[in-house]
Image (cartoon, rainbow, N blue to C red):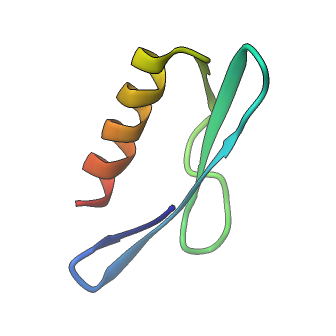
Amino acid sequence: MMAKRGHQLLGVGGIDAAKDEHYVQWLDTNERPAGKPFQFANTRAECKAVRIGMVSAAT
């Protein structure tokens, strides 16, 4: 997911999906990790929370 705020590019977010747990990592505009990757469970509630967080970061 490419994140933009107005015309400013914030970076790219990616998810490493697995059976039980997933990891999310953001890269800044220089393709460097923007913080540590974080883990979340493969549940509907966790996936929804991460999606809301990623959309919120992009707006």
Using the image, determine if residue 25 lies above or below residue 58: above
Using the image, determine if residue 29 lies above or below residue 43: below
The residue positioned 78% from the left and 20% from the top of the image is: 19
Name the outermost residue toward the right: 18
Q: Quadrant of residue 50?
A: top left
Q: In screen coordinates, is 32 left or right of 46?
A: right
Q: Residue 10 appears at what percent x and percent y?
A: 41, 68
Q: How many marks?
A: 0
The residue positioned 21% from the left and 79% from the top of the image is: 6
Q: Residue 4 appears at what percent x and percent y?
A: 34, 72
Q: Residue 24 appears at what percent x and percent y?
A: 61, 38
- Choose between 43 and 35: the one closer to the eye: 43
The residue positioned 62% from the left and 35% from the top of the image is: 36
Name the outermost residue toward the bottom: 7
Q: Quadrant of residue 20?
A: top right
Q: Quadrant of residue 22?
A: top right
In the picture, the quarter occupied by the C terminus is bottom left
Q: In screen coordinates, is 37 left or right of 58?
A: right
Name the outermost residue toward the front: 44
